[in-house]
Amino acid sequence: MAETETNPLRRPLPDGIVPEGEVTRTENRWIAIVLGMLGVMMAVIVVTGVTNALHPPSNVEIIDPTTLHLGGEFAESNLGTAAEPDGSVTVRLIAEQYNFVPECVRVPADTPVKFRLSSADVIHGFLLVGTNVNTMVVPGFVAEVRTSFNALGDYRMPCHEFCGVGHQGMWAHVNVVPKGRFPHLSTTERTSCVQQ
Amino acid sequence: MARDKGVLRLTNPWPRFAWLAGAAIVGISLALGFLVLDRYQQNDPPLGLWGAICWGLGITADLGPAREAAPTLRTPSRIAWTSSTLGQIRAGDAQHGSFIALNCTACHGEGGMSQSTFIPTLTGMDPAVIFKQLDDYRSGKRPWGVMGAIAKALSIRDSADVAAYYAARPNGLAAIAHEGSLRGESRSKESDSARHLAFMGDEQRGIPPCTACHGPHGYKIGAPPLAGQHAAYIERQLAAFAQRLRQNDINEQMRTIAMQLTPSEMHALAAFYGAPESSRVANK
């Protein structure tokens, strides 16, 4: 105790303003509230994550944004919807100032869809109105989003990451058609609903 | 007095409780984040333990891109705007380019001021544009008999030189754009819709404004200046992009836009950008 007496910072605070038991009870109460809040937040993250399939985009695939058009996955001949052997489809898109290419994507309903996007210049955003599809498209990386569409129709696909002076004109569509009306694609065919 | 009583003493349970609670929160978070949440990827069976950990860390090499067969590769151009390409363009020698340009005057006019409405004016053209178009003619990505033959006779170095020469010519496209003659054009109703397309685009149809890439609002490399170019040439190129007769735009940029324009819009835009004969003479 002698040591604490000499150290002015260690000197005991004057007691008696609030009874010590009361202080302890208040502290314990707040600790319980904080732990409860943490628990609720964790539970919300876990439950929504599992039930709504909400995942942070954790795909780290690197790609050179300046040479996308020279070959590889994002060459223009490979863009659009591709049919996979397991019955799912993969959609490949390029986001560039100020277009999505292709600007109209056709996918079948009630089918697993995997979107793969890359940016040719700056950061763009990929969002499908009315769905939980929402990711950033960062140049140099491949953004991947999985979903499936139950409702038919035309989904708007705006760029929601301000990308420059033409940003307001940058949006495209996803057209969901019944499974039977989706063209049967061989492994080397790609489709889109861009009017030629 | 309880506050200073042996905070550091082992018998005091509270520090230990705080450390344990902290460790438990970290541990539970790690377990949830790496072992539970990322196991359930939509449309796929749940991942295994190691797969989930790797996925959570962003390592997806084992899942990676689908390896299905790809269609026959079609590329729009051999040019990519890499630093080495930009270096080649910067190294262009206008002096040497002026000798090469003597071969161009027959069609593109004295100093690049074309007199034919179907042949583009090159005076004051961005050097990257000339460099890329020459390479596209050379590789046949932009098929055009005459220019293909001429470009094949030029080396990459020659292309950069002639591009530097035309870019440095005074009173050309760059100067017209700089003077802002765009806004002073005719005030007919048709050009109002063209003006709106040029400056605002059409957000209802997802068409970005021309000025966002072709200037003056924004510039994108490879996009030529338009003000002062021949209207008939601009209209023909828009139609060629829309009909996919011309496919040398990187990442289908112009094809995507031109496809959404109606023929009358193409005509109006071309008339809006194309300088009338009188103003071009005045600018000479």
Image: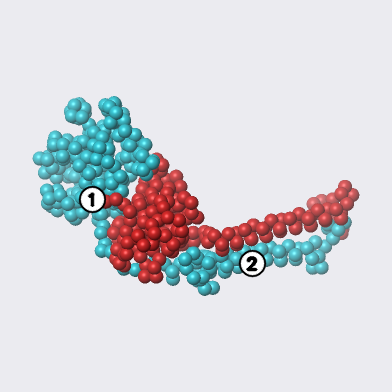
What residue sits 20% from the left and 36% below the top?
B230
Q: CA distance from mark 2 to mark 1?
A: 57 Å
Q: Which residue is mark 2?
A: B27
The reply to whether residue B111 is in sight is no
* Label 1 crowd (10 A; few <14 / some 14-19 / many >=20): some
The reply to whether residue A23 is in sight is yes
Q: Examine the image and state in which quarter residue A116 appears.
A: bottom left
**Residue sitting nearer the eye, B36 or B184:** B36
- Give the side of residue A75 with respect to residue B246, left or right: right
Amino acid type at image mark 1? Arg
Q: Give the mark count.
A: 2
Amino acid type at image mark 2? Gly
Rendered position, B236 above or below A69: above
What residue sits 30% from the left and 57% below the top?
A76
Task: Chain B: give its colour.
Answer: cyan
Rendered position, B93 above or below B114: below
Report the coloring of the rendering: by chain
What residue sits 31% from the left and 52% below the top?
A194
What chain does mark 2 sit on? Answer: B
